[in-house]
Image (cartoon, grey):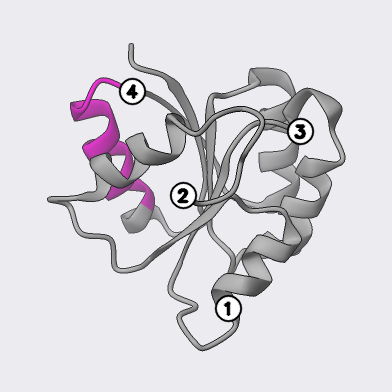
Amino acid sequence: MKGRILVIEDNEQNLYLIRYILEDSGYEVFSAADGQEGIDRAASLLPDLILLDIQLPFMDGYAVARKLRGNLDLAETPIVAVTSYAMPGDKEKAIEAGCSGYIEKPIDPDTFDKQVEKYLSLKRQDRREP
């Protein structure tokens, strides 16, 4: 396996597509359907990368990112917002909340695995988007 990725996504169709692309590319994929489940799974799995939807039930992705960053075991884990929020300032808001980067939905199946690889290769001391 190329790496362990946790996908926090409540939309089953989006999750199916992301899982299909990443597993086909050799990644081990885990999922959570809401923010709290994602926080709990991340703490137990300690994945190499977290892909985080921003529009989640009960707790939005910004709050999830802040909580994940509060866990010292996950402090260096890249978190990438994968979201349809594409208005001016949305990317900056995700970065301020603790995300390492931002991928807009709808994802492009032809390039998504390469985008993910870019974030997996980030240096641990610099989690921000290259």
- What's the mark number on residue 130? 2
Looking at the image, how many numbered discs can be counted on the residues?
Answer: 4
Instruction: Point out the tag, 1 or 3, that comes first from the N-terminus.
Output: 3
Magenta-colored segment: predominant secondary structure: helix
Real-space CA distance between mark 2 and mark 1, rounded to the nearest whole angstrom: 18 Å
Real-space CA distance between mark 4 and mark 2, rounded to the nearest whole angstrom: 22 Å
Let me know if residue 24 is in the magenta part.
yes
Instruction: Point out the tag, 2 or 1, that comes first from the N-terminus.
Output: 1
| Amino acid at circle 2 | Pro
Residue at 69% x, 31% y is 76
> Element type at marker 1?
helix
Mark 3 vs mark 2, foreground winner is 2
| Amino acid at circle 4 | Tyr
Instruction: Point out the tag, 4 or 3, that comes first from the N-terminus.
Output: 4
Q: Nearer the viewer, residue 7 or 71?
A: 71
Residue identified by numbered label 1: 90
Let me know if residue 99 is in the magenta part.
no
| Amino acid at circle 3 | Ala
